[in-house]
Image (spheres, rainbow, N blue to C red):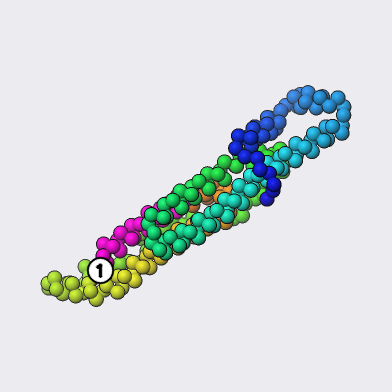
Amino acid sequence: MGTGTTSGPARQRHTEDLLAAVSMTSSQLAQAVGRFDGDTAAMVTAAIRTAERAFEELDACYDVIDEASATGQAIAARLSGLLAAEDEQGVGPELDALDAVSARVRGTDQARELLHRVLGREEAAERTLPVVRRLTGADLPGLPSAYADDAGFDDLMALAAREEELAPRLRAAHAERLREVAAHLVRVVEQVAAVGFTDEVFARESVHEARRAHELWVRSLAERRRDLG
C-alpha cells in the first residue's frame, strides 16, 4: 500500500512524536508555530512534511497488514496439504506462524488509530466479519459400532462378525470426520487472512479456534488408529 519502510524502534519513535503533537494544548501549539516568525510558507511546508511522514507511517502499517494477509493465505494452503497428508508434526509450526502473523498486525493497531487522528480522518470501516464457528466432536458424523446395535449377541464370534461387517462404514466415517475437521481448520485461517487480521477480537477468536480444531483433528486421528489399527 505504500513505500514506507520505517520499522522497529524508529517507527515507535515517530509514533510517539505524532502522539505528542496530537496532545499539544493551544498555547503549546502557538509557541511551536512561533518558531516560524510569521513565515506562512514555512509553516505550510512543515505541515505538508508532517502529513507526508504520517502517510508514510500509515502506509507502512498497511504494508504489514497486506503481508499478513498474504502470509495467512499461504499458511492456509500449507495446512491444507499437511492435513491431507496427515502430517501431525507439520501442523503445529504453521499454527505458531499464524500466531506470530496476528501479533504483528496487533502491533500496528495503536499507530493506525493515532495516524488517522493526526490526518483528521476516520479509518475505513471494516467489512462485515463472518462468525467464527466452533467445531466440536459432537458436530462430526457418528461412528458405527456393534455395541450400539439393538440386537444382542450370544457370543464373541457373533460380535466379531458384526464388527467386521461394519468395518467399511467405520472407515468411511473416520475419513469423513477427519475431512470435516481439516476443512474447518483451513476455512478458519482463510477467513481471518482475508481481512488481514485487522479486527483484534476476530483474529484472536480465529487463532484460538484454529488451535482447537487442530486438537480435535489429532484426537480424530487417534480414534481412527484405535478403531482400525
Left or right of 186 in this view: 219: left
Read off the residue under disc 1. 145
x and y percent of residue 159 in the render? 17, 72
Dot 1 lies on which element? loop
Picture quarter with the C terminus: bottom left
Vertical placement of residue 221 versus 160, above or below: above
Asked if residue 68 is among those painted magenta in the image, a careful observer would answer: no
Query: Does the rendering let one see residue 103?
Result: yes
Region in magenta:
207-229
Q: Residue furthest left?
A: 155
Residue 20: name its quadrant: top right
Residue 32: name its quadrant: top right
x and y percent of residue 202 in the render? 52, 50
In depth, the one of 189 and 127 nearer the eye is: 189
Asked if residue 220 is among those painted magenta in the image, a careful observer would answer: yes
Number of residues whose C-alpha sits closer than 10 Å to that of mark 1, classed few (under 14), some (14–19) or many (20 or more): some
Q: Of helix, strand and loop, which mostly describes the magenta segment?
A: helix
Q: Residue flagged by tag 1: what amino acid is it?
A: Ser
Left or right of 41 in this view: 195: left
Query: Does the rendering let one see residue 116?
Result: no
Residue 116: name its quadrant: top right
